[in-house]
Every structure is written in structure tokens, then in C-alpha cells.
Amino acid sequence: MATNSSKTTGKSSNSGGAKPSGVSAEQVVGTFQRMRQEQRSMASKAADMEMEINEHSLVIDTLKEVDPSRKCFRLVGGVLVERTVKEVLPALEANKQQISKVVETINTQMQAKGRELTEYRERYNIRLVGEGDSGDSQSAAGSKDSEEGGSKSGAGVLVS
């Protein structure tokens, strides 16, 4: 949802949310797309780690039902090592906990990146293709611009 209202904080803002001088539309779009790609890569990494957590859970559940003195094999740094279940199980549970903490950290970073993206979109009035195409939202945005004393319809950047 694109909003045309400028952000009002205690600091002085740009003239109605227009782009600061010296920054071209291409630079704005490039920076926005780079930020979106960073957020996507974080999401991909979090999904991969969630899959690892699920795999660890499956192995842990399986090994809990096995005799602790039974021989098992574990891949450590590309090397297959022979251990017993009672040696491997605590290490797997610790790895699962560490991966969970990393996923939490990545999710926090993704939320921060999302807020940063939203602020960037508002600052440069970036609209995505296909966003806000309905007539109702456009007329509502136009009336809000009129109430604020100016129209920003030509100041935005359209990103595909």
C-alpha cells in the first residue's frame, strides 16, 4: 500500500517528501532493489535454516528411540565419523538450539530491513508496478495530497 503522506517527526523533513537533490531516479531504484534483494536473501537463508532444524528434529526423535550404546555415524566437516548414539544426541540437540538462535537473529534483521525499506519507499515515494491500481485508492490519495497543500503525483518513482 503506497501512501503519499510525508513522515512528520521532530526533525525537519524534505519539502513534502520529494527526493533530496543530487540523487537520480536510477540511483533510488537501484538502492531500493538492492535492499529488496538483501531482504529476500535473508528470507531464503532463514528458510534453509528452518529446514535444517526440521531435519535435526527428525534425527533427534529417531535417535531417542534407539539404544544409547548403538553405533551411529555423523558427518562432521565433510568427514564421516563413527560415534555412539549417547555421544551424538547431545551434540545434535545443541546444534539445533544454535540454529534456532541464528534463525531468530535473521528474523530480527529481516524485520529491521523491512522497516528500512518502508521508510525508503515513503521518503522517495516509490510505488511498485500493480500497486494501488484501483480508482478508490488513487482518488483517496489525491484528496489527501490536496489537503496537504500540494500534489506529489509526478514526484514518485515506479519500480517493477
Image (cartoon, rainbow, N blue to C red):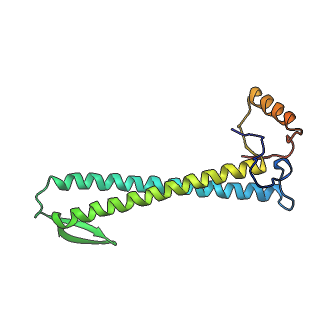
Q: State left or right for residue 35 relative to residue 101.
A: right
9 up-or-down from 133: above or below: below
Instruction: Examine the image and state in which quarter residue 71 appears.
Output: bottom left
Q: Nearer the viewer, residue 72 or 95?
A: 95
Q: In x, y percent, where is residue 31?
A: 71, 58
Instruction: Examine the image and state in which quarter residue 83 appears.
Output: bottom left
Q: State left or right for residue 4 relative to residue 70.
A: right
10 up-or-down from 95: above or below: above
The structure residue drawn at horizontal position 27% and vertical position 60%, both measured from the top left corner, is: 93
Q: Nearer the viewer, residue 34 or 90?
A: 90
Q: How many marks?
A: 0
Residue occupying the far top of the picture: 136
Q: Nearer the viewer, residue 74 or 154?
A: 154
Q: In x, y percent, where is residue 131?
A: 71, 37
Q: In x, y percent, where is residue 96?
A: 33, 59
The structure residue drawn at horizontal position 78% and vertical position 40%, both measured from the top left corner, is: 4
The structure residue drawn at horizontal position 72% and vertical position 49%, both measured from the top left corner, is: 121
Q: In x, y percent, where is residue 64?
A: 17, 54
